Image (cartoon, grey):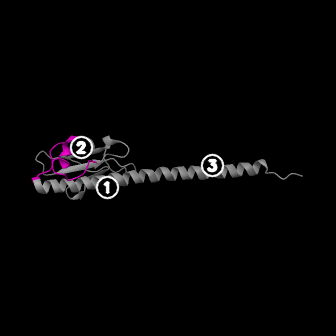
């Protein structure tokens, strides 16, 4: 007589494997989001430090509201930062806003795992940004 698995046993094992695969997939997705958020926060802090060095030399922050063109002064001619970081998933999620006189600024980004909005100098970022940093740290 041949010994073999019953249909019920095969179904139970395949269901358990499917549940484990689904749990692993969800965990991986959540860890990926947290990893990208950590990179965003680190990048914002690096730019914040470069802005503080710029201000110590120039007595004001760069005036403008464009991440790329306004903050290019941080890497040329004096190098405060090697290169401007970009968002790991969507480069349009990182913002720079400054007051018209260059005395205050906000660096802002959208975190995937946070839903609480932050305070920004610009009204268009209020509903979009969930992490903001300014001259004295987090806003």
N-terminal of the pair, mark 2 or mark 1, is: 1
N-terminal of the pair, mark 3 or mark 1, is: 3
Residue 115's label in the rendered image is none
The single residue placed furthest to the right in the displayed view is 1
Please indicate whether residue 74 sits to the left or right of residue 18 in the image: left
Question: What type of secondary structure mainly makes up the magenta span?
Answer: loop
As helix, strand or loop, the secondary structure at mark 2 comes to helix
Please indicate whether residue 63 sits to the left or right of residue 43 in the image: left
Residue 130 percent location from the top left of the image = 32, 49
The residues bearing labels 3 and 1 have C-alpha atoms spaced at a distance of: 36 Å
Q: Are dots 3 and 1 in contact, CB under 8 Å?
A: no
As helix, strand or loop, the secondary structure at mark 3 comes to helix
Q: Give the total of numbered labels.
A: 3
The residue depicted at 60 percent of the width and 53 percent of the height is 20
Give the camera-side residue of 136 and 123. Answer: 136
Please indicate whether residue 67 sits to the left or right of residue 40 in the image: left
- The residue under label 3 is 18
The residue depicted at 11 percent of the width and 55 percent of the height is 57
The residues bearing labels 2 and 1 have C-alpha atoms spaced at a distance of: 16 Å
Query: Badge 2: few (under 14), some or many (20 or more) residues near its Cα, within 10 Å?
Result: many
Which range is magenta?
58-84
Residue 134 percent location from the top left of the image = 22, 54
Q: Does the image show residue 126? A: no
- The residue under label 1 is 42
Give the camera-side residue of 60 and 131. Answer: 60
**Residue 92 forms part of the magenta stretch:** no
Residue 65 percent location from the top left of the image = 20, 42
């Amino acid at each position: 007589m041949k010994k073999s698995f019953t249909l019920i046993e095969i179904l139970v094992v395949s269901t358990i494997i499917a549940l484990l695969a689904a749990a692993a997939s969800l965990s991986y997705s959540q860890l990926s989001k947290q990893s990208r958020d950590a990179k965003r926060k680190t990048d914002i802090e690096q730019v914040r430090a470069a802005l503080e060095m710029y201000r110590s030399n120039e007595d004001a922050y760069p005036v403008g509201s464009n991440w790329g063109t306004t903050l290019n002064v941080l890497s040329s001619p004096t190098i405060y930062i090697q290169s401007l970081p970009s968002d790991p998933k969507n480069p349009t999620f990182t913002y720079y806003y400054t007051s018209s006189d260059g005395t205050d600024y906000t660096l802002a980004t959208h975190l995937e795992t946070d839903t609480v909005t932050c305070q920004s100098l610009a009204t268009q970022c209020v509903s979009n940004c969930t992490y903001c940093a300014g001259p004295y740290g987090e806003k």
